[in-house]
Image: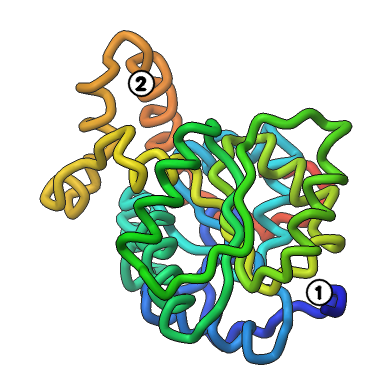
């Protein structure tokens, strides 16, 4: 397999929100873009944006550059979709990372593509593999590795992924470890489609529960998680939600200019 030096072209319109070019895409559009990248053997690095990342990207250069490096950048949080409408730069819908993950697994099974799963604890990963094999009996799992490896082991992990010949890599890892791994190893992986899915491994493995569909539709998944872990989450959500609203108000008054890799935001 050749190095994924060439990035896939995404024939989708973008909207500039908080300095980032978000693709105005549906789940169907995102899957089609990934399918085209697989056919052309070109890199399709998928990124997702939620309120927490909007708040943190201006003080976190690694996060900011990782988002700018994405070939397909989608609104994972319903709050981002609502903000796009308030700003009159509307996005068609929320594309949750876990929903795209499931859709790409279905694509992999249909087209005979192989996947590599990187992240979570070893026991969770084992359960995830078992459940995916039950749910998608024709899915080809090229490899799986838990996310508990050191920086010194990252190159060996990347080699294992490359040698697996996987068509898609799903990273069930937290930030900033995921961003660091992709920034340092992306060119060595030789995987066309790369998608960071956060805690989706835990959800599909049945370790944690996702919010009911109605809560998802109303953009209240954060509240559902808060009710499960109020003592741990209240400070984070109070800070994030408050700052996001303030940033939205500032964006209304003075829209951000496009962010650039390696540059500190000026607005």
Mark 1: secondary structure: loop
Q: Which residue is disc 2 drawn over?
A: 238
| Of pointers 2 and 1, the one earlier in the residue sequence | 1
Residue located 61% across and 59% down the image = 116
Which dot, 2 or 1, sits closer to the camera? Answer: 1
Residue located 69% across and 35% down the image = 177
Residue located 36% across and 43% down the image = 205
Q: Residue 4 carries which label?
A: 1
Above or below, 74 against 226 in this view is below
Above or below, 100 against 52 in this view is below
Q: In which quarter of the image is residue 143?
A: bottom right
Density class for disc 2 (Cα within 10 Å; few <14, some 14-19, many ≥20) is: few
Density class for disc 1 (Cα within 10 Å; few <14, some 14-19, many ≥20) is: some
Quadrant placement of the C terminus: top right
- Is 255 left or right of 248, judged from the image as shown? right
Marks 2/1 in contact by CB < 8 Å: the verdict is no
Q: Position of residue 45 (x, y in %)?
A: 65, 65
Is 5 in front, or is 155?
Answer: 155
Quadrant placement of the N terminus: bottom right
- Is 165 left or right of 233, judged from the image as shown? right
| Furthest residue in direction left, as rendered | 214
Is 54 in front, or is 258?
Answer: 54
Q: Position of residue 137 (x, y in %)?
A: 37, 70
Mark 2: secondary structure: helix
Q: In which quarter of the image is residue 114?
A: bottom right
């Amino acid at each position: 397999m050749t190095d994924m030096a060439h990035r896939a072209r995404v024939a989708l319109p973008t909207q500039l929100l908080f300095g980032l070019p978000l693709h105005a895409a549906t789940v169907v559009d995102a899957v089609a873009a990934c399918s085209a990248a697989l056919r052309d053997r070109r890199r399709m690095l998928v990124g997702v944006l939620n309120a927490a990342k909007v708040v943190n990207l201006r003080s976190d250069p690694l996060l900011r550059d990782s988002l700018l490096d994405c070939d397909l950048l989608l609104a994972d949080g319903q709050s981002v979709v609502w903000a796009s409408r308030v700003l009159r730069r509307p996005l068609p819908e929320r594309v949750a990372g876990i929903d795209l993950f499931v859709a790409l697994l279905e694509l992999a099974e249909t087209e005979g593509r192989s996947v590599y799963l990187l992240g979570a604890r070893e026991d969770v990963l084992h359960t995830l593999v078992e459940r995916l094999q039950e749910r998608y009996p024709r899915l080809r799992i090229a490899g799986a590795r838990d996310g508990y490896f050191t920086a010194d082991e990252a190159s060996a992990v990347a080699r294992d992924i490359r040698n697996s010949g996987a068509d898609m890599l799903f990273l069930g890892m937290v930030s900033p470890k995921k961003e660091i791994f992709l920034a340092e190893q992306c060119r060595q992986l030789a995987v066309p489609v790369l998608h960071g899915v956060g805690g989706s491994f835990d959800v599909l493995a049945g370790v944690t529960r996702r919010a009911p569909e109605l809560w998802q539709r109303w953009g209240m998944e954060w509240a559902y998680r808060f009710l499960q872990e109020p003592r741990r989450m209240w400070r984070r959500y109070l800070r994030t939600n408050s700052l996001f609203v303030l940033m939205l108000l500032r964006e209304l008054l003075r829209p951000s200019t496009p962010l650039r890799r390696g540059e500190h935001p000026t607005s």
